[in-house]
Amino acid sequence: MGTQLVFVNRLQEVHRLRDLVAARRPALVVLRGRRRVGKSALLHEAIPHGRVVSYQADEQDVEAQLRLLAREAAALLPGSPPLAFSDWDWALEFFGRAAADDPLVVILDEFQFLCSAETALPSIVQRHWDRWDRDGVPLVLVLAGSALSFMDGLLDHGAPLFGRATYRPLLLPLDYRDATELGPGRATPSEQVVRYAVLGGTPQYQLWAGRRRTANVIRDAILTKGAPLYEEPLQLLRAEDELREPRGYFSVLRALGAGRTRTGEIASAVGRDTSATSRLLERLAELGYAELREPLQPSGPRARGIWQIADPYFRFWFRYVFPNRSRLERGRVAEVYREIDADLDTYTGVVFEEVCRAWLARYSEAGQDADAVGSWWSRRADAEIDVVAMRSRDYRFLGACKWSTRVGADVLERLHAHRALLGSRAAQAELAVFGRGFTERARERAAREHVRLVGIDELF
Protein backbone atom coordinates (compact mmCIF):
# COMPACT_ATOMS: atom_id res chain seq x y z
CA MET A 1 0.00 0.00 0.00
CA GLY A 2 1.38 3.43 -0.92
CA THR A 3 2.22 6.03 1.66
CA GLN A 4 -0.34 8.80 1.92
CA LEU A 5 1.10 12.20 2.80
CA VAL A 6 -0.25 13.54 6.07
CA PHE A 7 0.74 16.50 8.12
CA VAL A 8 -0.12 17.24 11.74
CA ASN A 9 1.82 19.67 13.94
CA ARG A 10 5.65 19.39 13.50
CA LEU A 11 5.65 23.21 13.65
CA GLN A 12 9.13 23.52 15.08
CA GLU A 13 10.64 21.39 12.31
CA VAL A 14 8.67 23.18 9.60
CA HIS A 15 9.76 26.62 10.75
CA ARG A 16 13.41 25.58 11.01
CA LEU A 17 13.46 24.04 7.54
CA ARG A 18 11.73 27.03 5.98
CA ASP A 19 14.21 29.37 7.67
CA LEU A 20 17.13 27.40 6.23
CA VAL A 21 15.68 27.57 2.73
CA ALA A 22 14.87 31.27 3.04
CA ALA A 23 18.40 32.09 4.25
CA ARG A 24 19.80 31.36 0.75
CA ARG A 25 22.94 29.88 2.27
CA PRO A 26 24.43 26.37 2.26
CA ALA A 27 22.77 24.02 4.76
CA LEU A 28 23.15 20.30 5.42
CA VAL A 29 20.10 18.67 7.01
CA VAL A 30 20.20 15.11 8.33
CA LEU A 31 16.59 14.03 8.97
CA ARG A 32 16.08 10.80 10.90
CA GLY A 33 12.91 8.92 11.75
CA ARG A 34 11.44 5.45 11.59
CA ARG A 35 9.44 4.37 8.57
CA ARG A 36 5.84 5.66 8.42
CA VAL A 37 6.57 8.47 10.91
CA GLY A 38 6.00 11.26 8.37
CA LYS A 39 9.41 12.37 7.06
CA SER A 40 8.13 12.76 3.50
CA ALA A 41 5.07 14.66 4.71
CA LEU A 42 7.25 17.01 6.74
CA LEU A 43 9.51 17.78 3.78
CA HIS A 44 6.51 18.25 1.49
CA GLU A 45 4.93 20.66 3.97
CA ALA A 46 8.10 22.60 4.75
CA ILE A 47 9.50 22.74 1.20
CA PRO A 48 6.48 22.50 -1.11
CA HIS A 49 7.49 24.82 -3.95
CA GLY A 50 10.46 26.33 -5.72
CA ARG A 51 13.58 24.67 -7.06
CA VAL A 52 13.51 21.28 -5.37
CA VAL A 53 14.95 17.95 -6.50
CA SER A 54 13.54 15.15 -4.38
CA TYR A 55 14.63 11.55 -4.88
CA GLN A 56 13.29 8.54 -2.98
CA ALA A 57 16.01 5.88 -3.00
CA ASP A 58 15.53 2.12 -3.02
CA GLU A 59 17.78 -0.92 -3.09
CA GLN A 60 18.84 -0.77 -6.74
CA ASP A 61 22.48 -0.58 -7.83
CA VAL A 62 24.31 2.73 -8.12
CA GLU A 63 23.86 3.05 -11.89
CA ALA A 64 20.08 2.67 -11.61
CA GLN A 65 19.94 5.13 -8.71
CA LEU A 66 21.88 7.76 -10.64
CA ARG A 67 19.72 7.27 -13.72
CA LEU A 68 16.54 7.87 -11.69
CA LEU A 69 18.08 10.83 -9.86
CA ALA A 70 19.05 12.39 -13.21
CA ARG A 71 15.44 12.05 -14.36
CA GLU A 72 14.30 14.04 -11.30
CA ALA A 73 17.04 16.64 -11.80
CA ALA A 74 16.20 17.13 -15.47
CA ALA A 75 13.23 19.27 -14.45
CA LEU A 76 15.73 22.00 -13.58
CA LEU A 77 16.69 22.23 -17.25
CA PRO A 78 13.48 22.09 -19.27
CA GLY A 79 14.07 21.75 -23.00
CA SER A 80 17.65 20.51 -22.60
CA PRO A 81 18.95 17.13 -23.81
CA PRO A 82 18.40 14.17 -21.42
CA LEU A 83 20.58 14.44 -18.33
CA ALA A 84 22.90 11.60 -17.29
CA PHE A 85 25.12 11.22 -14.21
CA SER A 86 28.12 8.92 -14.66
CA ASP A 87 28.88 8.90 -10.92
CA TRP A 88 28.05 10.69 -7.68
CA ASP A 89 30.81 13.25 -8.16
CA TRP A 90 29.18 14.40 -11.38
CA ALA A 91 25.70 14.45 -9.80
CA LEU A 92 26.80 16.61 -6.87
CA GLU A 93 28.86 18.82 -9.14
CA PHE A 94 25.75 19.39 -11.24
CA PHE A 95 23.67 20.36 -8.18
CA GLY A 96 26.37 22.74 -6.95
CA ARG A 97 26.52 24.53 -10.29
CA ALA A 98 22.73 24.69 -10.53
CA ALA A 99 22.50 26.23 -7.05
CA ALA A 100 25.17 28.83 -7.85
CA ASP A 101 22.75 30.35 -10.38
CA ASP A 102 19.63 30.07 -8.22
CA PRO A 103 19.05 28.61 -4.70
CA LEU A 104 18.29 24.89 -4.75
CA VAL A 105 17.03 22.19 -2.36
CA VAL A 106 18.13 18.59 -2.95
CA ILE A 107 16.42 15.83 -0.94
CA LEU A 108 17.94 12.34 -0.90
CA ASP A 109 15.40 10.20 0.95
CA GLU A 110 16.28 6.77 2.40
CA PHE A 111 19.91 7.80 2.16
CA GLN A 112 21.07 4.51 3.67
CA PHE A 113 20.12 2.71 0.42
CA LEU A 114 22.30 5.07 -1.61
CA CYS A 115 25.22 4.43 0.72
CA SER A 116 24.68 0.70 0.52
CA ALA A 117 25.10 0.89 -3.27
CA GLU A 118 28.01 3.38 -3.05
CA THR A 119 29.87 3.02 0.24
CA ALA A 120 32.08 6.06 -0.46
CA LEU A 121 29.07 8.38 -0.78
CA PRO A 122 29.42 10.08 2.65
CA SER A 123 33.02 11.01 1.79
CA ILE A 124 31.95 12.25 -1.64
CA VAL A 125 29.22 14.38 -0.05
CA GLN A 126 31.76 15.75 2.44
CA ARG A 127 34.11 16.87 -0.30
CA HIS A 128 31.40 18.74 -2.22
CA TRP A 129 29.75 20.09 0.92
CA ASP A 130 32.99 21.62 2.17
CA ARG A 131 33.36 23.48 -1.12
CA TRP A 132 29.73 24.67 -1.12
CA ASP A 133 30.08 25.83 2.48
CA ARG A 134 33.35 27.65 1.77
CA ASP A 135 31.96 29.37 -1.31
CA GLY A 136 28.54 30.16 0.15
CA VAL A 137 26.63 28.17 -2.49
CA PRO A 138 22.90 28.49 -1.63
CA LEU A 139 22.18 24.76 -1.69
CA VAL A 140 20.17 23.00 1.03
CA LEU A 141 21.05 19.28 0.98
CA VAL A 142 18.65 17.05 2.93
CA LEU A 143 19.79 13.52 3.76
CA ALA A 144 16.78 11.63 5.15
CA GLY A 145 16.74 8.06 6.39
CA SER A 146 14.85 5.51 8.48
CA ALA A 147 17.89 3.40 9.50
CA LEU A 148 18.40 5.31 12.74
CA SER A 149 21.75 3.98 13.87
CA PHE A 150 23.18 4.32 10.35
CA MET A 151 21.98 7.92 10.08
CA ASP A 152 23.39 8.73 13.51
CA GLY A 153 26.68 7.15 12.47
CA LEU A 154 26.99 9.58 9.57
CA LEU A 155 27.64 12.32 12.13
CA ASP A 156 29.78 10.39 14.62
CA HIS A 157 33.24 11.63 15.55
CA GLY A 158 35.59 10.44 12.82
CA ALA A 159 32.83 10.02 10.22
CA PRO A 160 33.13 12.10 7.01
CA LEU A 161 30.17 14.34 7.87
CA PHE A 162 31.07 14.85 11.53
CA GLY A 163 30.47 18.45 12.62
CA ARG A 164 28.92 19.48 9.30
CA ALA A 165 25.17 19.13 9.85
CA THR A 166 23.38 22.46 10.06
CA TYR A 167 20.23 20.78 11.42
CA ARG A 168 19.73 17.15 12.48
CA PRO A 169 16.13 16.57 13.62
CA LEU A 170 14.91 13.20 14.88
CA LEU A 171 11.26 12.85 13.88
CA LEU A 172 9.30 10.98 16.54
CA PRO A 173 5.73 9.64 16.42
CA LEU A 174 2.98 12.13 17.21
CA ASP A 175 1.99 12.55 20.83
CA TYR A 176 -1.44 11.44 22.01
CA ARG A 177 -3.11 14.81 21.41
CA ASP A 178 -1.80 15.27 17.88
CA ALA A 179 -2.64 11.66 16.99
CA THR A 180 -6.32 12.27 17.81
CA GLU A 181 -6.53 14.72 14.89
CA LEU A 182 -6.30 11.71 12.57
CA GLY A 183 -9.06 9.74 14.31
CA PRO A 184 -12.86 9.94 14.45
CA GLY A 185 -13.97 13.54 14.85
CA ARG A 186 -16.59 12.88 17.54
CA ALA A 187 -14.68 10.38 19.67
CA THR A 188 -14.83 10.87 23.44
CA PRO A 189 -11.58 11.35 25.38
CA SER A 190 -11.81 7.75 26.60
CA GLU A 191 -12.20 6.50 23.03
CA GLN A 192 -9.25 8.64 21.96
CA VAL A 193 -6.99 7.12 24.63
CA VAL A 194 -8.01 3.58 23.64
CA ARG A 195 -7.32 4.33 19.97
CA TYR A 196 -3.91 5.76 20.87
CA ALA A 197 -3.19 2.69 23.00
CA VAL A 198 -3.89 0.49 19.96
CA LEU A 199 -2.31 2.54 17.15
CA GLY A 200 0.18 4.86 18.83
CA GLY A 201 1.31 8.08 17.18
CA THR A 202 2.66 6.84 13.83
CA PRO A 203 0.72 8.92 11.29
CA GLN A 204 0.49 6.24 8.60
CA TYR A 205 -1.05 3.74 11.05
CA GLN A 206 -3.68 6.28 12.00
CA LEU A 207 -4.41 6.89 8.31
CA TRP A 208 -4.67 3.21 7.51
CA ALA A 209 -7.13 2.85 10.39
CA GLY A 210 -9.23 5.69 8.98
CA ARG A 211 -12.10 7.25 10.90
CA ARG A 212 -13.45 3.94 12.12
CA ARG A 213 -14.15 3.21 15.76
CA THR A 214 -11.39 1.37 17.58
CA ALA A 215 -13.26 -1.94 17.76
CA ASN A 216 -13.60 -1.94 13.96
CA VAL A 217 -9.97 -0.89 13.57
CA ILE A 218 -8.83 -3.88 15.61
CA ARG A 219 -11.02 -6.36 13.74
CA ASP A 220 -10.71 -5.00 10.20
CA ALA A 221 -7.32 -3.26 9.97
CA ILE A 222 -5.22 -5.34 12.38
CA LEU A 223 -6.61 -8.85 12.90
CA THR A 224 -7.84 -9.56 9.37
CA LYS A 225 -5.36 -11.32 7.13
CA GLY A 226 -4.20 -9.02 4.33
CA ALA A 227 -5.21 -5.85 6.18
CA PRO A 228 -2.62 -3.04 6.13
CA LEU A 229 -1.61 -3.44 9.79
CA TYR A 230 -1.81 -7.24 9.96
CA GLU A 231 1.91 -7.85 9.36
CA GLU A 232 3.35 -4.35 9.62
CA PRO A 233 5.79 -5.03 12.52
CA LEU A 234 7.11 -8.16 10.82
CA GLN A 235 7.65 -6.31 7.56
CA LEU A 236 9.45 -3.41 9.24
CA LEU A 237 11.73 -5.64 11.30
CA ARG A 238 12.58 -7.84 8.33
CA ALA A 239 13.44 -4.70 6.34
CA GLU A 240 15.92 -3.52 8.98
CA ASP A 241 19.34 -4.14 7.46
CA GLU A 242 20.87 -3.64 10.89
CA LEU A 243 18.94 -6.49 12.55
CA ARG A 244 20.75 -9.73 12.00
CA GLU A 245 19.06 -12.93 13.18
CA PRO A 246 15.53 -11.42 13.13
CA ARG A 247 14.01 -14.45 14.87
CA GLY A 248 15.91 -13.58 18.04
CA TYR A 249 14.50 -10.06 18.01
CA PHE A 250 10.97 -11.35 17.37
CA SER A 251 11.31 -13.64 20.39
CA VAL A 252 12.46 -10.76 22.60
CA LEU A 253 9.61 -8.53 21.43
CA ARG A 254 7.09 -11.32 22.04
CA ALA A 255 8.42 -11.71 25.59
CA LEU A 256 8.09 -7.96 26.13
CA GLY A 257 4.58 -8.05 24.69
CA ALA A 258 3.68 -10.81 27.15
CA GLY A 259 4.67 -8.58 30.06
CA ARG A 260 8.25 -9.66 30.79
CA THR A 261 10.18 -6.57 31.80
CA ARG A 262 13.40 -7.70 33.50
CA THR A 263 16.37 -8.89 31.48
CA GLY A 264 16.48 -12.19 33.37
CA GLU A 265 12.79 -12.84 32.76
CA ILE A 266 13.15 -12.06 29.08
CA ALA A 267 16.25 -14.29 28.79
CA SER A 268 14.35 -17.21 30.33
CA ALA A 269 11.42 -16.67 27.98
CA VAL A 270 13.57 -16.64 24.84
CA GLY A 271 15.98 -19.38 25.93
CA ARG A 272 19.18 -17.29 25.84
CA ASP A 273 21.66 -16.19 28.45
CA THR A 274 21.32 -12.70 29.92
CA SER A 275 24.36 -11.35 28.09
CA ALA A 276 23.01 -12.31 24.66
CA THR A 277 19.54 -11.07 25.59
CA SER A 278 20.96 -7.74 26.75
CA ARG A 279 22.63 -7.27 23.39
CA LEU A 280 19.34 -7.92 21.58
CA LEU A 281 17.50 -5.47 23.86
CA GLU A 282 20.13 -2.78 23.44
CA ARG A 283 20.01 -3.13 19.67
CA LEU A 284 16.22 -2.84 19.66
CA ALA A 285 16.55 0.27 21.83
CA GLU A 286 19.06 1.83 19.41
CA LEU A 287 16.54 1.36 16.59
CA GLY A 288 13.64 2.77 18.62
CA TYR A 289 11.69 -0.47 19.09
CA ALA A 290 12.36 -0.99 22.81
CA GLU A 291 13.14 1.28 25.73
CA LEU A 292 14.59 0.93 29.21
CA ARG A 293 12.65 2.77 31.90
CA GLU A 294 14.28 3.66 35.19
CA PRO A 295 12.64 5.08 38.33
CA LEU A 296 13.06 8.82 38.71
CA GLN A 297 15.15 9.57 41.79
CA PRO A 298 17.49 12.39 42.85
CA SER A 299 20.66 10.52 43.72
CA GLY A 300 22.17 7.33 45.03
CA PRO A 301 22.70 4.03 43.23
CA ARG A 302 20.62 3.61 40.09
CA ALA A 303 17.73 1.24 40.50
CA ARG A 304 17.29 -1.59 38.06
CA GLY A 305 15.20 -0.50 35.13
CA ILE A 306 12.47 -2.32 33.27
CA TRP A 307 12.19 -2.94 29.54
CA GLN A 308 9.14 -2.35 27.39
CA ILE A 309 8.23 -2.03 23.73
CA ALA A 310 8.52 1.66 22.91
CA ASP A 311 5.67 2.08 20.42
CA PRO A 312 2.05 1.44 21.54
CA TYR A 313 1.08 -0.24 18.27
CA PHE A 314 4.06 -2.60 18.35
CA ARG A 315 3.22 -3.33 22.00
CA PHE A 316 -0.38 -4.11 21.07
CA TRP A 317 0.68 -6.24 18.12
CA PHE A 318 3.18 -8.38 20.02
CA ARG A 319 0.77 -8.78 22.92
CA TYR A 320 -2.27 -9.80 20.91
CA VAL A 321 -1.51 -10.49 17.23
CA PHE A 322 1.85 -12.28 17.13
CA PRO A 323 0.92 -15.06 19.59
CA ASN A 324 -2.42 -15.62 17.80
CA ARG A 325 -1.26 -15.60 14.20
CA SER A 326 -2.03 -19.27 13.60
CA ARG A 327 -5.67 -18.72 14.56
CA LEU A 328 -5.88 -15.47 12.60
CA GLU A 329 -4.45 -17.16 9.51
CA ARG A 330 -7.43 -19.52 9.71
CA GLY A 331 -9.86 -16.60 9.90
CA ARG A 332 -10.77 -16.87 13.59
CA VAL A 333 -10.89 -13.10 13.98
CA ALA A 334 -14.02 -12.90 16.14
CA GLU A 335 -12.61 -15.39 18.63
CA VAL A 336 -9.32 -13.50 19.02
CA TYR A 337 -11.11 -10.16 19.19
CA ARG A 338 -13.27 -11.35 22.11
CA GLU A 339 -10.14 -12.23 24.05
CA ILE A 340 -8.59 -8.83 23.27
CA ASP A 341 -11.76 -6.99 24.25
CA ALA A 342 -11.79 -8.74 27.63
CA ASP A 343 -8.21 -7.62 28.33
CA LEU A 344 -8.20 -4.21 26.61
CA ASP A 345 -8.85 -2.14 29.74
CA THR A 346 -5.86 -3.73 31.47
CA TYR A 347 -3.64 -3.00 28.48
CA THR A 348 -4.98 0.54 28.06
CA GLY A 349 -4.31 1.31 31.72
CA VAL A 350 -0.56 1.13 31.11
CA VAL A 351 -0.75 3.44 28.09
CA PHE A 352 -3.01 5.78 30.08
CA GLU A 353 -0.12 6.26 32.53
CA GLU A 354 2.10 7.31 29.61
CA VAL A 355 -0.58 9.73 28.40
CA CYS A 356 -0.73 11.29 31.88
CA ARG A 357 3.06 11.71 31.95
CA ALA A 358 2.95 13.30 28.50
CA TRP A 359 0.23 15.69 29.65
CA LEU A 360 2.28 16.75 32.66
CA ALA A 361 5.46 17.24 30.61
CA ARG A 362 3.91 19.08 27.65
CA TYR A 363 0.56 20.60 28.52
CA SER A 364 0.28 21.20 32.26
CA GLU A 365 1.62 24.25 34.05
CA ALA A 366 2.65 21.95 36.89
CA GLY A 367 5.23 20.28 34.65
CA GLN A 368 6.58 23.29 32.81
CA ASP A 369 9.44 23.98 35.23
CA ALA A 370 10.32 20.32 35.81
CA ASP A 371 13.79 19.03 35.02
CA ALA A 372 12.44 15.54 34.37
CA VAL A 373 9.09 13.72 34.21
CA GLY A 374 8.77 9.99 34.68
CA SER A 375 7.65 7.51 37.32
CA TRP A 376 9.06 5.96 40.47
CA TRP A 377 8.94 2.50 41.97
CA SER A 378 10.57 0.39 44.64
CA ARG A 379 10.53 -3.39 44.46
CA ARG A 380 11.70 -3.59 48.07
CA ALA A 381 8.77 -1.49 49.32
CA ASP A 382 6.35 -2.88 46.71
CA ALA A 383 5.37 0.68 45.82
CA GLU A 384 4.94 2.67 42.64
CA ILE A 385 4.05 6.24 41.71
CA ASP A 386 2.85 6.52 38.13
CA VAL A 387 3.60 10.19 37.40
CA VAL A 388 6.56 12.03 38.91
CA ALA A 389 8.14 15.40 38.18
CA MET A 390 11.46 16.53 39.65
CA ARG A 391 13.26 19.86 39.85
CA SER A 392 16.57 20.56 41.57
CA ARG A 393 16.66 17.07 43.09
CA ASP A 394 13.27 17.51 44.75
CA TYR A 395 9.97 15.87 43.86
CA ARG A 396 7.55 18.56 42.69
CA PHE A 397 4.60 16.46 41.44
CA LEU A 398 3.38 12.96 42.32
CA GLY A 399 0.40 11.38 40.62
CA ALA A 400 -1.51 8.10 40.60
CA CYS A 401 -3.30 6.92 37.44
CA LYS A 402 -6.35 4.66 37.35
CA TRP A 403 -8.08 3.70 34.12
CA SER A 404 -11.37 3.58 35.97
CA THR A 405 -14.66 5.46 35.85
CA ARG A 406 -14.93 5.34 39.66
CA VAL A 407 -11.57 6.01 41.28
CA GLY A 408 -11.98 5.60 45.03
CA ALA A 409 -10.51 7.29 48.10
CA ASP A 410 -8.18 4.32 48.66
CA VAL A 411 -6.05 5.55 45.76
CA LEU A 412 -5.43 8.82 47.62
CA GLU A 413 -4.45 6.91 50.75
CA ARG A 414 -1.86 4.85 48.85
CA LEU A 415 -0.49 7.98 47.18
CA HIS A 416 0.12 9.59 50.59
CA ALA A 417 1.81 6.41 51.82
CA HIS A 418 4.07 6.22 48.78
CA ARG A 419 5.02 9.87 49.09
CA ALA A 420 6.18 9.17 52.65
CA LEU A 421 8.67 6.63 51.27
CA LEU A 422 10.40 9.44 49.35
CA GLY A 423 11.17 11.42 52.52
CA SER A 424 11.71 15.16 52.83
CA ARG A 425 12.41 15.65 49.11
CA ALA A 426 8.72 14.98 48.42
CA ALA A 427 7.30 16.99 51.32
CA GLN A 428 6.22 19.92 49.12
CA ALA A 429 5.16 17.90 46.08
CA GLU A 430 1.78 18.54 44.53
CA LEU A 431 -0.37 15.41 44.64
CA ALA A 432 -2.79 14.38 41.90
CA VAL A 433 -4.95 11.45 40.88
CA PHE A 434 -5.84 10.80 37.24
CA GLY A 435 -8.94 8.89 36.20
CA ARG A 436 -12.04 8.74 34.04
CA GLY A 437 -14.28 9.45 37.04
CA PHE A 438 -14.16 9.65 40.83
CA THR A 439 -16.38 8.53 43.70
CA GLU A 440 -17.95 11.14 45.93
CA ARG A 441 -15.76 10.03 48.84
CA ALA A 442 -12.66 10.48 46.68
CA ARG A 443 -13.79 14.00 45.75
CA GLU A 444 -14.47 14.93 49.38
CA ARG A 445 -11.13 13.60 50.60
CA ALA A 446 -9.23 15.22 47.74
CA ALA A 447 -10.78 18.60 48.61
CA ARG A 448 -9.80 18.24 52.28
CA GLU A 449 -6.25 17.11 51.54
CA HIS A 450 -5.57 19.44 48.59
CA VAL A 451 -5.09 16.57 46.15
CA ARG A 452 -5.80 17.48 42.55
CA LEU A 453 -8.23 15.25 40.64
CA VAL A 454 -7.46 15.24 36.92
CA GLY A 455 -10.33 13.91 34.83
CA ILE A 456 -9.71 12.51 31.38
CA ASP A 457 -11.37 15.50 29.70
CA GLU A 458 -8.64 17.74 31.11
CA LEU A 459 -5.96 15.74 29.27
CA PHE A 460 -7.40 16.93 25.94
Image (tube, rainbow, N blue to C red):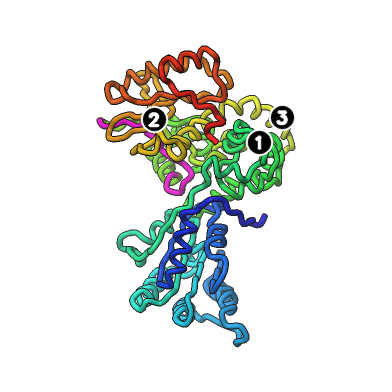
Q: Residues within 10 Å of mark 2 (few under 14, many from 20)?
A: many
Give the prevailing secondary structure in the magenta stretch: loop
Q: Residue at x 67, y 41 (%)?
A: 184
x and y percentages locating residue 74 in the rendered image? 58, 79
Q: Residue at x 38, y 58 (%)?
A: 153
Along the line of sight, which residue is nearer the eye, 379 or 262?
Answer: 379
x and y percentages locating residue 362 in the rendered image? 45, 40
Which amino acid lies under the numbered mark 1 shown in the image of this protein? Ala
Which amino acid lies under the numbered mark 2 shown in the image of this protein? Val
Mark closer to the chain start, 3 or 1:
1
Q: Which residue is mark 1?
A: 187
Along the line of sight, which residue is nearer the eye, 1 or 368?
Answer: 368
In space, the residues marked 3 and 2 are separated at their CA atoms by 39 Å
**Which stretch did the figure color magenta?**
285-300
Q: Which residue is mark 3?
A: 335
x and y percentages locating residue 327 in the rendered image? 69, 34
Q: Which residue is mark 2?
A: 388
Q: Residue at x 43, y 44 (%)?
A: 285
153 versus 460 height, above or below: below
